[in-house]
Image (cartoon, helix red, strand yellow):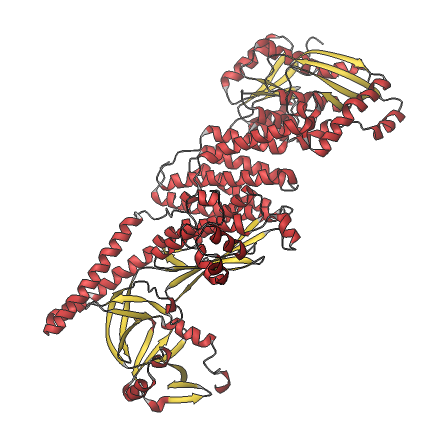
Amino acid sequence: MANEKKRVLIVDDAQFTRNILKNIMSKTGYVEIVGEASNGKEGIELFKKLKPDMITMDLVMPEKGGIETIEEILKIDSNALIVVVSALGQEALVLEAAKKGAKDFIQKPFKTEQIIEVLERILKKKAK
Amino acid sequence: MSVSKDDIKLFISEAEDLIQKVEDEIFKLEKDPNNTKPIQELYFAFHTLKGLTAMGGLNNASKFCHYFESFLDNAKDKKIEDVKQDDFIRLLFDSLDLLRSILKRVKQGDMSDIEEKFLNSIKDSFEEFESGPETDISLISPITPENFKKVLDDKKNLFYKIYIRLQPTCVFKKVRLFIIIRALNEYGQIFFSKPEPHLLEQGDIKVDFELYYLSQKIDKDILQVLDEILEIENKVITPLKIDEVKALIDEDITPWFKSDKKQVSGSKAGPIQRSKIAKVQKIEDISKIVDTHEEDAKITSLKVDINILEKLMNYFSELVINKNQITQILKNKGDLELIRMFDEMDKPFLEIQEIIFDLKLVRVESTFRKYRRLVRDVGKEVGKKVQLILEGTNVEIDRKILEELNSPLIHLLRNAIYHGIETPSERKKQKKDEIGTIRLATLRKAGLIFIEVEDDGEGINYENIRKKIIEKGMYAEEEASNLTHEDLNRVILMPGFSILEDADQISGRGMGLAIVADKIKQLGGSFSIQSEEHIGTTFRLMVPFTRAILSAQLIKVAGDLFAIPTENIKQIYLYNKAMVESVGDTDYYRLDSDLIPIIDLNQYLKFDENNYKKGSDTRIAVWVKKDENISAIFLIDEILQQLNVVVKPFKFSYSDFYNILGSTIMSDGSICLILDVLSIITSYMMDNKFTKLTSIQ
C-alpha cells in the first residue's frame, strides 16, 4: 500500500507553476508526478498514455485551452479527476470549467496547505 | 512577419464583408428569434473573423471573436430564451460596434488591439447568458404542496437541513456554490435554501448558508460528499421532521415560489433586476468606446479629405466656365488658331471631370444601412417595435450631399418612430401589424434624388394642428378652419411650429421639421409631407444628386435655348418629313428598318402652335437612346455647339413635371435649362403616349 503512490499529471504552460506544484506534491510522499504538459494538446496525449489519478489543469494556455482540454479528457474518461488551477479574476472561465465537469478548483497564487487540502480531500478519497 | 500594404487592404476588405454579414444576420435573428440559421451563420462569420484577426496580429480581437464562436456553437442547437433574447441581440450589436471601431483604427493605420478589459466584459456577459437564474433554477427545485405528497409516498426519502460556512478566503463563491450544489444533487435534490435559491445561485451570500435537502442517503454519507469539496470551513447536517418540512413549505417555499412566478416585487424581483443592471452596465462599457450613429454615417473609406475634393470640384467648375467664356470671345474675334487650341483642351477637361465625378459618387446604401440599427435602437428606447425597409439602396449620390442628408434623415426617422409608429398594443387595437414599418426609398430621376420616409403609423392629426396654431396665435380660428391639409402641411414646416409643447427628444435635439425643410432647401432640394390619419405619413425629399459638370448639346426650341446631355445623344439628323410614319396617334421616324417614336419638343414644352408649324420645314431630329426600350427622336428647331456646363439644381416647382435636369449659366450670364431627355421618354411611355409597336413588327 505504501508504495502505491497517487499518480498526478500537471497541465500548465508556465514551467514555474509546474515546478511549484511538483515540489509541493512530491514532498507529501504519496504523490508521484507522472507527467507535465505545457498545453492542452500535450495534456490530452499524456492523459491517454498515463491514465493518471488526478490532473491539475491551467485554463489559459496556447494550442488548446483548459476548457476544451477538460471536455476532451472527460470524453475519454468521464471519471477523470480534474482540478482547475486558475488565475484570479477568471470566475467565468472557472465556472465554465466546473460546468464542463472539473471536479474542483484552486486559485493562483496558491499556498502549500491548499494543495495539500486538494490532495487530502480529492485525491485520497478516490481510493476505491 | 511584416505585413504589406496590400495585405492590410485585403484584411480590411475581408473584415468589412464579415462584419457586414454579422450585422445582416443579427437583423435576421432579431426578426425571427426561433430561426437557428442566423446563429449558425453568425457562428461561421465569427469563426472566420477569429482567424482573420489572429492573422492580423490582433490577438485580443481574435479572442473576442472566439468567445462569440464558442458561445454560438453552444447556442446553435438550442433557442436562446425569450427573456434574454433582447439582451443577447444588444450584446451582439454592441460587439459589432466594437469590431467596427477596431476596423476603423486599422484603416487609419493603427493596428492596436482590443483592450483586455473588454475581453473580460464580454466573457462575463456570456456568463450571464449561460448561467442566468433561469438555467440555474433547475439546480434547486422547490417542493410545492402538490408534489410534497408524492415525495412523502416514498418512505425512503429523508429531509435535511445542511448548514455550510465557506472559508472567508473563498473568492469564486458562485463556482463554489455550483460545485457544492452539483455534488449534493448527485445523491438527492436540494429543494430550498436560505438565502433563497435565486440569491444563492447568483453567488449572493456572505460566507454561510443553509440548504434544504432531500435524499435517500444517511447523513454520514452526505458529509462524505461534502468532505471532498474545497473551501468549506464548517458544515452541519440536521435531519428534518416531516412537520418541519411542511412548515417550511407553507411559510417560506410557497410564498417565494409564488412571488417568483408573478415576477413582481417579492424577494425574487429585486436581485434579478440588480443582476440585469450589472449586465447592462457591462455591455455599456463596451459601447462606450464605439461611435455614435451620427459619427458612423461619415464615409471614411476615402483617403482624401472630402472637403479638398469639394474644393477641387469648385475650382474645376470655375475653370470650365472661364474656358467657355474665352472660347466665346475668341469666336467673336474670329481667332481660329486659338479656338482650335482651346478645343483640344476639351479632352483632358472631360477626363478630369469624369474622375472627379466618380470620386464624388457613392451608393446611398453605405449610409442608409446604418439606419436599420438606429431605427431599432430608437424603437427599443421608446418601447415600440419598428422595422426599416430600404429601397433603392444602389442609387448613387454625391458624397457630400449624402452626408448632408444624414442628419435630416435621422431626424425624420426618429420623428416617424416617436410620433408616427404607435405602441404595439395600440397597433393591435387598430388591427395593424404589431411591428411598425418605416420605408426609406430612394429613387434617382431627372438629375434629382427622391427620398421617401414613409411610416404606417398614426398619421398627422390635422385637427390637433388646427387647435395648436389657433392656441399659438399663428392663425385666427376662422382662418385656421379654412386651411386644407396641404396648407397645414406647410404650416408644420414653418419655423417655430412644434406639435409638442414641451421640449421632448425631438425639439430637444434642436431640429424640428422646419429645420429639416430648411436643410433640404440649402441643398437645392425640396421637402413635402403627405399624411393620412391612422394610415401613415410620408416625407418626401428631393435633392440634386450632384453639382457636377456635364457635357451638353445646346439646342434651340421655338427661339429658346436648352441643353441636352451629350451622353444621351446617339445621332443627329436633318429632319426629313418623308421618313415619318404614323401608327395610331403616334408618329415614328424610320431609320433603316427601325421605327423610332417621335417627341416634338416644341409640343412637349407647350410652345406656341404657330411658331412650331412655321419652323417645321428645317427642323432637326435628335436620336436619344439609352437602350432598346428608351429610345426616341426629339424634334428641335436648331442645333448649336457642345459645351461643358456646370449643372446647378433647378428649383422651380414644375421642373419635375417638365423633366428638367438642372440649369446652367451661360458665358453671357443667361440661364439655360438642361432637359432630362431620358426621363421625358420614360414619362411619355408611362402616359402611354406611344402606341405599342409590337403589333407592327
Which quadrant: the N terminus of chain B? top left
Q: Can residue B219 be seen in this view?
A: yes
Which of B530/B147 is in front? B530
User: How many marks overall?
Assistant: 0
Q: Can residue A76 be seen in this view?
A: no
Which of B249/B415 is in front? B415
Q: Compared to B5, does B277 lie above or below?
A: above
Place residue B561 in its image quadrant: bottom left
B1 left or right, relative to B246:
left
B551 left or right, relative to B495:
left
Q: Compared to B77, does B155 lie above or below?
A: above
Q: Compared to B668, does B297 lie above or below?
A: above
Q: Compared to B10, does B149 lie above or below?
A: above
Tell me where residue B697 appears, x and y as whole percent.
48, 86
Tell me where residue A116 appears, x and y as whole percent.
62, 10
B592 left or right, relative to B212:
left
Q: Farthest residue in the bottom direction?
A: B578
B296 left or right, relative to B666:
right
Place residue B354 in its image quadrant: bottom left
Tell me where residue A72 appears, x and y as whole percent.
63, 31
Tell me where residue A29 appears, x and y as whole percent.
63, 8
